[in-house]
Image (cartoon, rainbow, N blue to C red):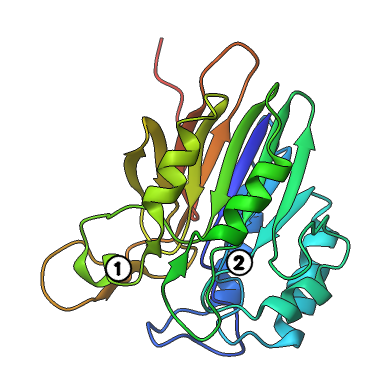
Amino acid sequence: MRIVQLSDLHLRPGRLYSGIDPWAAWGLALDRLATLVPAADLLLLTGDLADDGHPDTYRQLAESLLASRFQFAVLPGNHDHRAELRAAFAGQPWSHPELACQRVDCGEFTLLLIDSMIPGEEGGVFAEGQLAWLDSRCPGDRRVLLAMHHPPLAVGIAGMDAIACAGGERLAAWLADWPNVEAVLCGHVHRLVFGSLAGRPVITAPSTVHQVALGEGPLAYTTEPGGLLVHDWLPGQALRTHYLPLAAAPVVVYPA
């Protein structure tokens, strides 16, 4: 199974404060996806899909995804509007009366998408509601990945750690009882970061638009290239992840 993770699209009319056109970046991402061999089996969008939370933005994104003909799954981030997202993507298998959580089964694999947003706040949470949903939906006899917008651990960028996911210790305790959960895939940080929680990899995806600068001092952004992650999840093999920038470069075969 090949999962392509895209995150923090921040779609809205016009340009972002970084000067980047988010819809143009989304177009680059779709162009990049069209070149992948093997092709993606699933597009996983890990939050902050709309910068403005506007229903028209979600409708436009939904139309674009349907036209792409890829199977996809979405979850909300702190810039999203939960109800508008659920309404625009009514065909997604939402399985909680309030939270935008869903379970996606693909062959022998299961993805559990966790809604970590707190409406009106930048930080997220893994609380009793999310825990109860995981307990009710996680299979014990299948390989499982978790996906959520906010990473449940510190990433070493003070401004992002201040708005990370509260309740990471609760998730770590849960993971200790579920050895078939192999990794946690996140967004929010606007750059590729690898960490570990309860012995499981935690991977944050780059944004399709601007990236968060790595460094000390005030939270800052940089116009480093947008990117995406390709997760190959194969029978009998551990999950492996590739980073790809949105803009493709020439491919040159080494001389014999």
CA neighbours of label 1 inside 10 A, class few (<14), some (14 to 19), many (20+) = many
Residue lying at 83% horizontally and 55% vertically, measured from the top left: 93
Residue 249 shows up from this direction = no
In terms of depth relative to the viewer, which is nearer, 134 or 52?
A: 134
Identity, as a three-letter code, of the amino acid under mark 2? Trp
In the rendered picture of this protein, how many numbered marks are placed on residues? 2
Residue 115 lies left or right of residue 108; in this view the side is left
Residue lying at 79% horizontally and 26% vertically, measured from the top left: 107
Residue lying at 62% horizontally and 32% vertically, measured from the top left: 144
Q: Quadrant of residue 22?
A: bottom right
Residue 65 lies left or right of residue 52; in this view the side is right
Task: Give the residue at the far right of this rendering.
Answer: 91
Q: Which mark is residue 69?
A: none
Q: Which mark is residue 160?
A: 1
The kind of secondary structure element at disc 1 is helix
Q: Marks 1 and 2, Cα distance to the nearest angstrom?
A: 23 Å
Tag 1 and tag 2, C-beta contact below 8 Å = no
Where residue 25 sits: x, y (%)?
55, 68
Above or below for 134 versus 178: below
Q: Which circle's residue, 1 or 2, is located before the other in the chain?
A: 2
Task: Tell me the residue that label 2 is attached to.
Answer: 26
Q: Quadrant of residue 77?
A: bottom right
Residue 143 lies left or right of residue 155; in this view the side is right
CA neighbours of label 2 inside 10 A, class few (<14), some (14 to 19), many (20+) = many
Identity, as a three-letter code, of the amino acid under mark 1? Met
Residue lying at 84% horizontally and 60% vertically, measured from the top left: 66
In terms of depth relative to the viewer, which is nearer, 246 or 243?
A: 243
Where residue 147 sits: x, y (%)?
57, 49
